[in-house]
Amino acid sequence: MNGAVALIIAFTAVFALCRKTELYPALTDGIKDGLKVIYKIFPPVAAMLTAVYMFRASGALEILTDLLRPALAALGIPPETAPLLLVRPLSGSGALAVATDIIKQNGADSTIGRIAAVMAGSTETTFYTVSVYLGAAGIKKSRYAVPAALVADLAAFIAAGMAVRLLFGSA
Amino acid sequence: MVLCWIWTCLVLASVSFGCLGGRLGIVSAAALEGASASLELCLGICGAVCLWSGVMEVMRRSGLASLLSKLLKPALTLLFPSAGKDEEALEALSQNASANLLGLGNAATPAGIRAAVRLKYLTGKSSSSAGDELCRLVVLNSASIQLIPTTVCAIRAAAGAEAPFDILPAVWLTSLISVSAGLAAAYIFARLGKACKRP
């Protein structure tokens, strides 16, 4: 799986060459856009990480985790990922901050660290997406769009734990 | 708006619990630590995010993304039967789906919005409530179906993961389950809604 990225990069380069695309300017332009992405996510990440660090240092995170432990354990979700579940549908950069914290605290190659990464990688900022698409189309009644999208999120949170345990063994 | 509340609640809860536990000093130190950790995070993932964004731009300009969107059309016609008959809607839908798969966030949203506007037009201009196909579009977009979630992999790399991309199969499996569950829920909710309306 680790070779995949190198292969994709090489394949893209060869494809671009065959299509006579100006590869190098496209590459550097794209990299410039990547810088803009980082520039855009830094302010919300800084705000959210400050709050998350305070929350953890105060001991409140531990209490919240303990409170949600029985419910989450029943679903096979590690209670340590509780903050991620709460922030994920609301804020993309907030979720990035929270996921980073969980991954750092538990270790990138730990089961919890992997589950947090899979959760963050397989979900979207649901409320933002719903408001952008329905707002653009001028829709006032969203009917079942929000609950259905939240069902997808919940399924992803449960499936992340299962998938990681299935593919990596439960260490 | 919601974020204002969340942020304030987090900070107030931290200060209250810090006071109760006599850990206010630690909480203060943590605030500064968190802020500097955010810079560390952004710098840590900056290179990888930029590189991938560059590769994506090559995919877009070379026509690889539009090739993928052509391949997706048959599957999307099944999911969006009425939009499948409309060339403009199908074009926007497939561009949206291929951009999502490749992680081209900047291209996915405009295409998705074009698809949403067209879907609404197809269901009748006057209606102000979301049609079934529009709801499905929202579900498809809010359940991320990204082939390579580079940002998360970059975070794992920065946190010292031995093989940052080894989570990919787990991510695909999870995305697949999540999208299926979302679409199934949309189908059930649509049926329930119709059943309720009937006398």
Image (cartoon, rainbow, N blue to C red):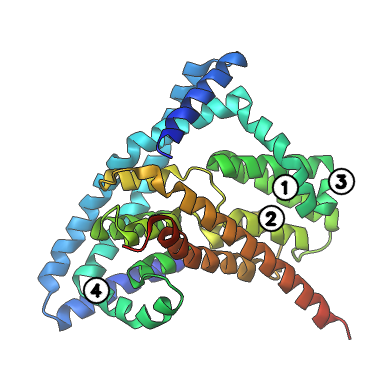
Q: Quadrant of residue B123?
A: bottom right
Structural distance between the alpha carbons of marks 2 and 3: 16 Å
Disc 3 marks a residue whose amino acid type is Lys
Element assignment for label 2: helix
Question: What chain does badge 1 belong to?
Answer: B
Image spot of residue B40 (x, y percent)? 24, 45
Disc 2 marks a residue whose amino acid type is Leu
- Mark in the foreground, 3 or 4: 3
* Nearer to me, A119 or B23: A119
Structural distance between the alpha carbons of marks 3 and 4: 55 Å
Mark sitting earlier along the chain (4/2) = 4
Query: Dot 3, how many residues are within 10 Å of its Cα: few (below 14), some (14-19), or many (20+)?
Result: few
- Residue B131 seen in this snapshot: no
**Do residues under tags 3 and 4 come within 8 Å of each other at their CB atoms?**
no
Reading the image, the residue beneath label 4 is B14
Question: What chain does badge 4 belong to?
Answer: B
Residue visible at 58% across and 69% down in the picture: A151
Disc 4 marks a residue whose amino acid type is Ser
Mark sitting earlier along the chain (1/3) = 3
